[in-house]
Amino acid sequence: MATALCPGSFDPVTNGHLDIIERTSRHFDDVIVAVIRNPQKTQSLFTLEERQEMLAEVLGHLGNVRIEFFKGLLVDFAKDHGAEAIVKGLRAVSDFDYEFQMAQMNQSLAGIDTFFISTSPQYSFLSSSLVREVARYGGDVTGMVPPSVATRLTDRFPEGGDAR
Ligand code: PNS
């Protein structure tokens, strides 16, 4: 059984994440979407429970994918769960430096390899933080996130968000 981790904050899950997770699930027997419990980013929009609910709603069709939380080092979580690979999406050159550094650190810490999948071009500009910002000011996030996530964002920022 080859197990891969798709780690992240998922605040919220975007269509870009979904693309990477779906493609990862075709290449590995078992995929764990690892949601970080203690992100360095302090400004979370959705609670952990909400993030898990949204992920569960959009990943239900993938039989070999499950959702787990972790805190601390990703490599420790990987060891505990028998995962031998981390899979990340690369959007643009700007992602590369940090992702490459993390991949080398994780390889050095625990011998775990990181595989990069190039993001599908239609999602290369997407990030959870930009989606949050667009929704906060009443912008249309249709096509950027799954419909159920868009509904939650609209509920969170009704009446055009914080733009008024
Ligand atoms: O969605 P994000 O916020 O870009 O995800 C970042 C994440 C959670 C993948 C990354 O911060 C991480 O792996 N954190 C766990 C702590 C850790 O292992 N740090 C050392 C990595 S070199």
Image (spheres, rainbow, N blue to C red):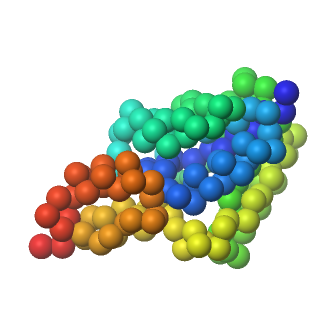
Q: Is residue 162 visible?
A: no
Residue 31 at x, y percent in the picture: 70, 36
For residue 53, which quarter of the picture? top left
Give 97 or 164, whichever is nearer the viewer: 164
Q: Is residue 146 above or below residue 53?
A: below
Q: Is residue 61 visible?
A: yes
For residue 47, which quarter of the picture? top left
**Residue drawn at (59%, 73%) of the image:** 122
Residue 116 at x, y percent in the picture: 77, 58
**Total label count?**
0
* Quadrant in which the C terminus is drawn: bottom left
Q: Relative to 129, is 133 on the left or the right?
A: left
Give 2 or 19, whichever is nearer the viewer: 19
Residue 111 at x, y percent in the picture: 87, 40
Residue 44 at x, y percent in the picture: 37, 49
Q: Is residue 147 above or below residue 58?
A: below
**Residue drawn at (62%, 44%) of the image:** 7
Q: Is residue 24 above or below residue 120?
A: above
Q: Residue furthest top?
A: 80
Q: Relative to 161, is 9 on the left or the right?
A: right
Q: Residue furthest front?
A: 61
Q: Relative to 129, is 61 on the left or the right?
A: right
* Quadrant in which the N terminus is drawn: top right
**Residue drawn at (79%, 33%) of the image:** 29
